[in-house]
Amino acid sequence: MRIENLNISNTAVGVQLGFSSHNIIKNNTANSNNGDGIELGYSSNNKIYNNTANSNNHNGICLWDSSDNNTIYNNNASNNGCGIRLGYSSNNNIIANNIVSSNNWNGIYLYSSSNNTLINNTANSNNHNGICLWDSSSNNTIYNNNASNNGDGIELWYSSSNKIYNNTANSNNGWGIKLKGSSNNTIYNNNVSNNGDGIELWYSSSNNTIYNNNASNNDDGIYLEYSSNNNIYLNNFINNTDNVYSLSSTNIWNSTEKITYTYNGDTYTNYLGNYWSDYKGSDADGDGIGDTAYSIDGDKDYYPLVERFESYIGSEDGDLDGDGTVDIDDVILLLEYVGDLSDEPLDGGDVNCDGSVDMGDVILLLNHVNNPATYEIGCCG
């Protein structure tokens, strides 16, 4: 069924489907409804795109109760209670390229919903959170979103095993990225600047991995309260009022394995910590690692970097993100570069050594990740 080109306003619900699948909902306007602009329950494999669900709906777009494998993209869901809301809906829902701004509560809100992907959304100027994962929302991917000028940028409450990367959470969020009671998440390659706190972990948020983030010009670059056993390394903490605040928290502030890296033209292998703009120590041997530890309220970064982490280029073939391992994240980075989805420079992408960086390198690197013994990479391999 196709539902398109409708203008539905001032009704109980704009567009509502239950137990309905394989529909296309596009080019509709659903504004100022007492309930939701577009609502699906127990409905899967639908496409919802190019709709406008603005102005005083309870939720602009809402998926509820086992609504799986839906695609929600290119919609504008602003000035509602929530922009886009998923409840108890998991398994490959894709929320992409939407504008969810100036909502009274959250821009995008996942409640007890797992295995979904949020990519390339603009979630700005929402009163509560730009993006919020709540109550055991796990194994979601939050990638390449802009969450700025919200109450908080990206927030996880009691939600674990999610990946949060390549997001921008800048400009007057209360917190750029905030975790409460959330563990085993991976947070990397994010830009969190000019907020209350850049990255905050509290209330027993443990066993998270945080690396390759830029946190600058916040009140606190990273704030930890009663949150231990997190691995925090290869981040830049620059010109924050306090680069770090840690209360009753003991964490690992360097890579857990030695990394081979190139610094000022020479190759070294060592543990790597974080870059702290207020670090005053020296680097007598010139390996890019400070000679004395950086103190963190009773904790320490024993391998502080004397320059930003971007100056430490991983020299292992295929380790394109410089985290010391060759894995699917490197494949994604290379694919984005080849497909012109990223403007960032990329060193070491020619893994098949043919003089160019193209899809052949992507295929070889993926095969290597899946079966390294069979597929060798690198010009010295």
Image (cartoon, grey):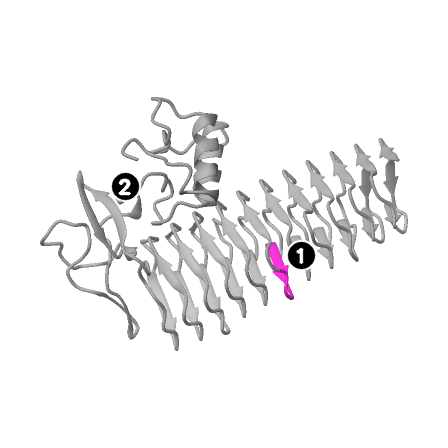
Secondary structure of the residue carrying numbered label 1? strand
* Neighbours of disc 1 within 10 Å: few (<14), some (14-19), many (20+): many
Relative side of 47 to 157, left or right: right
What stretch of residues is rendered in magenta?
Answer: 131-137
Residue drawn at 13 percent across, 56 percent down: 282
Residue that sits furthest to the bottom in the current view: 248
Left or right of residue 176: residue 242: left
For the question of whether residue 15 can be seen, the reply is yes
The picture places residue 314, in percent across and down from the top left corner, at 29, 43
Label 2 element class: loop
Q: How many marks?
A: 2
Residue farthest to the front, as pictured: 374
Residue 342 in sight from this viewpoint: no
Residue contact between numbered discs 1 and 2, judged by CB atoms under 8 Å: no
The first of marks 1 and 2 along the sequence is 1
Identify the residue under disc 2: 315
Figure quadrant of the N terminus: top right
| Observer-nearest of 263 and 326 | 326
The residue indicated by pointer 1 is 110
Task: Give the quadrant of the C terminus.
Answer: top left
Question: Where residue 90 appears, x then y in whole percent?
Answer: 70, 54
Q: Left or right: 23 with respect to 146?
A: right
Q: Amino acid at mark 1?
A: Leu
Q: CA distance from mark 1 to mark 2?
A: 39 Å
Left of 271 or right of it: where is 224? right
Residue ranking furthest to the top: 355
The kind of residue on which mark 2 rests is Ser
